[in-house]
């Protein structure tokens, strides 16, 4: 209602207003109807009071408050400690796994085991050799299952190609096991937990790789290098440049009668492959010829090997008494003389023969390092004839690294 402009004025209703107070309702407002919640004396399920809503809202937004700096530092320190512990546990687990698995890391703490499995004198010597090889591993041409099948004219799908589960250093260790112990492929497959065909491909791959790498190093030594490393035993034979010897490997009998006669060695009374090795007086291998059929003579293998072009008249070589090459080399030859059958032998010749024989014994210990590779004690199967030159050459050249890298010509 509008109040009158004066005390005597008349009250007027506002526009659109409706009177609600009458005499019959005693001029009072009707009490407001209670809701269901108020009538039940509590709150509806799922509803909260305003105060509770405010309290929950405050509790839900506690995370927005900035924590104290000391709490942050404490949590950060605990996280860092846990992270370091987790890293150490993972490293210990990896070390334990690698030591349990057959491979180089399993024997890293035993030089005796390293000598047995690889012929390297110690783990450190083997690691120095690995340091020379591993930069070239990414460029290694691998023999794959597809390549092997292609050579045999067998169709294979790309999905058939297998990926080696061994690390490169363990692949090299496997290859050294094969040479040092003459291990069978099945035995190596069980030890390393891989397929037998994978073992074969690893051996071929590493023999080709090391043949190319070690074969690229110049091993023929200059006169200055020879004199620099000349042992005291060779004082009276200081012009000796190389000691020559032949090595024969027993091989499987071919089916061809012609090949059987070519590989038969009357000296070994067996079918063999024959190679010429040159060793410096201090023990370094300085010459390795390709393998030839066992029936070849010493003169023939010396001519075919090409070592004659490296010899000059001012130098000397040392050979065994049965190595009859006097008329095919341009240089001096030291060798024990044949004393049997002579009525009277000059004392000087006897002394020279004894001295030369003593030197041969000195050199034999170096020659035996090559022969200690048990692979050459086995009968070479015919299926390895395509790769035997690589295996033979690598085994000979490895002796220059097994006791530390010997002096080589630059």
Image: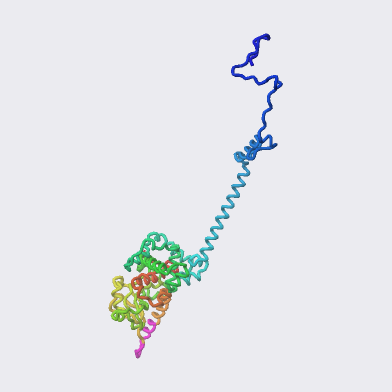
Instruction: Give the left or right position of residue 68, taking residue 233 as reference.
Output: right
Q: Position of residue 236 (x, y in %)?
A: 38, 76
What is the quadrant of residue 134 in the picture?
Answer: bottom left
Q: Is residue 69 above or below residue 253?
A: above
Q: Position of residue 158 (x, y in %)?
A: 37, 61
Could you tell me which quadrant the C terminus lies in?
bottom left
What is the quadrant of residue 277 in the picture?
Answer: bottom left
Q: Is residue 305 magenta?
A: no
Q: Is residue 347 magenta?
A: yes
- Residue found at the very far bottom of the displayed protein: 343
Could you tell me which quadrant the N terminus lies in?
top right
Q: Position of residue 396 (x, y in %)?
A: 39, 71
Q: Which residues are magenta?
A: 340-353
State whether residue 313 appears in this view: no
State whether residue 82 appears in this view: yes
Q: Position of residue 175 (x, y in %)?
A: 42, 68
- Residue found at the very far front of the displayed protein: 24
């Amino acid at each position: 209602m509008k109040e009158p402009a004066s005390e005597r004025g008349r009250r007027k209703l506002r526009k659109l207003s409706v009177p609600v107070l009458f005499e019959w309702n005693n001029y009072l407002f009707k009490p407001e109807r209670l809701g269901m919640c108020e009538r039940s004396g509590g709150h509806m399920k799922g509803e909260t009071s305003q105060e509770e809503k405010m309290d929950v809202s405050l509790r839900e937004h506690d995370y927005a408050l900035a924590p104290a700096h000391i709490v942050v530092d404490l949590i950060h320190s605990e996280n860092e400690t846990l992270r370091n512990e987790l890293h150490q546990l993972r490293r210990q687990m990896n070390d334990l796994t690698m030591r349990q698995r057959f491979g180089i890391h399993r024997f890293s703490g035993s030089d005796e085991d390293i000598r047995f499995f690889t012929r390297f004198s110690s783990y450190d010597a083997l690691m120095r050799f690995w340091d020379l090889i591993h930069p070239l591993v990414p460029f290694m041409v691998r023999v794959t299952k597809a390549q092997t099948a292609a050579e045999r004219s067998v169709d294979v799908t790309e999905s058939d190609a297998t990926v080696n589960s061994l690390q490169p250093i363990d692949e090299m260790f496997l290859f050294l096991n094969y040479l040092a112990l003459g291990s069978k492929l099945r035995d190596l497959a069980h030890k390393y937990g891989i397929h037998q065909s994978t073992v074969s491909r690893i051996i071929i791959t590493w023999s080709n790789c090391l043949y190319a790498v070690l074969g690229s190093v110049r091993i023929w030594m200059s006169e200055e290098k020879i004199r620099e490393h000349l042992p005291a035993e060779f004082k009276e034979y200081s012009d000796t440049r190389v000691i020559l010897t032949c090595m024969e490997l027993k091989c499987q009998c071919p089916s061809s009668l012609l090949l059987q006669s070519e590989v038969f060695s009357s000296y070994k009374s067996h079918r063999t492959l024959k190679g010429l090795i040159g060793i410096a007086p201090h023990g370094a291998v300085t010459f390795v010829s390709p393998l030839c059929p066992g029936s070849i003579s010493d003169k023939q293998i010396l001519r075919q090997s090409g070592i004659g072009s490296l010899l000059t008249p001012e130098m000397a070589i040392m050979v065994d008494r049965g190595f009859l090459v006097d008329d095919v080399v341009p240089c001096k030859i030291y060798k024990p003389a044949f004393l049997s059958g002579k009525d009277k032998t000059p004392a000087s010749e006897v002394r020279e023969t004894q001295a030369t024989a003593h030197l041969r014994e000195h050199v034999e210990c170096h020659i035996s390092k090559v022969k200690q590779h048990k692979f050459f004690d086995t009968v070479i199967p015919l299926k390895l004839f395509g790769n035997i030159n690589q295996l033979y050459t690598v085994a000979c050249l490895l002796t220059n690294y097994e006791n530390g890298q010997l002096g080589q010509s630059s």
